[in-house]
Image: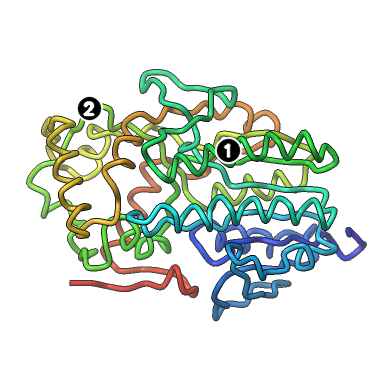
Amino acid sequence: MSSATGSRIVVTGATGNVGTSVVRRLSEDSQVGSILGLARRIPDWSPARTEWSPVDISSERSDLAGTFADADAVIHLAWAFQPTHDPATTWRTNVLGSIRVFEAVAAARVPTLVHASSVGAYSPGSKDRTVDESWPTHGWPDAAYCREKAYLERALDAFEREHPEVRVVRMRPAFLFKRESASEQRRIFGGRFLPGPLARPELLPFLPDIPGLRVQALHTDDAAKAYALALNSEARGAFNLAADPPVDAELLGEMLGTRPVRLPRAAARSAIAAAWGLHLLPASPHLFDAVLRLPLMDCTRAHDELGWRAEHTATEVLEEFLQGLQRGEGARTEPMKGRKVG
């Protein structure tokens, strides 16, 4: 456990969008003595005081309890977004794998578990006001991502009752972006063959303005700051994380210099459903339905109890991400590698 040399932190999913920011942040924290990053594929990246271990949380052969031995905290970030056409596969990794992580935390007597939940865990809410962490977390049942995030909220409810000695923190961030995540997120949501250079304002004759399409965004590095603050506190429970202002067609139109044009929900969904059905688009119409219903989050609790503030506005986040798309940028890990297409 903790010693004069600092705490030992284990991070699952350490090579993805959030994981790379969290590991980098922890490697710069003088209170952290060592970091063990878990990933299916070991990266060509060596942050200070960080070691790597090849682990697949979905495999029953993985000795997670042994891996977590002597850890002061486990930050659980591992998540599979694909394949959206095979929800049983993502369920095995995201739900069953996460429960395996929770059980290993208890077995190894790790005192702190920080879990990556999401705005996607929340039940539908208004786009005109914000909700705090007491808002119901039943997700949108038709979307696998929301269904899995919501199920894990219930699993953690049971875990906390059975293991009150473990301090559990649930981070519920908005949509997370950074320059280095551009190529990965293009492949996950737009498809591997979607050219990043198409993300140029001058190529957009108009911007679709879809009723209900108003969401929040956050820089991944700002989310990582919240994870680090949670480790260095006694905080428990859930924390909403988002940057201002909320993102809608009006904001995007101003940012891109493009005219918003109203597009009915049904027309947009039909186009997405057709592309998804033909395996041309990885993002499912079910996730589109969920996004239209996600509530806007109030982040007062993170401000007051963690002393957290987003350093990047949502506009800055999206501008940086679009630049990354155009340039095919990425990071030095397998999930994040930059690739230009087209």
Q: Quadrant of residue 230?
A: top right
Q: Are marks 1 and 2 in contact (CB under 8 Å)?
A: no
> As rendered, which of 251 and 101 lies closer to the eye?
101
Q: Amino acid at mark 2?
A: Pro
Which residue is labeled 1 in the image?
309
Q: Amino acid at mark 1?
A: Arg
Per the model, the C-alpha gap separating discs 1 and 2 is 29 Å
Q: Which is in the foreground here, disc 1 or disc 2? A: 2
Q: Residue at x 60, y 41 (%)?
A: 171
Question: Looking at the picture, how far across and down is residue 181, in whole percent?
Answer: 41, 61
Question: Looking at the picture, how far across and down is residue 275, in whole percent?
Answer: 17, 53
Secondary element under disc 2, as helix, strand or loop, is loop
Disc 1 crowd, CA 10 A, few/some/many (<14, 14-19, 20+): some
Residue 290 placement, left or right of 22: left
Secondary element under disc 1, as helix, strand or loop, is loop
Q: Residue at x 59, y 22 (%)?
A: 134
Which residue extends farthest left? 205
Question: Looking at the picture, how far across and down is residue 320, in whole percent?
Answer: 36, 54
How many numbered circles does the render carry? 2
Question: Looking at the picture, how far across and down is residue 11, in whole percent?
Answer: 66, 61
> As rendered, which of 149 and 328 lies closer to the eye?
149
Which mark identifies residue 211? Answer: 2
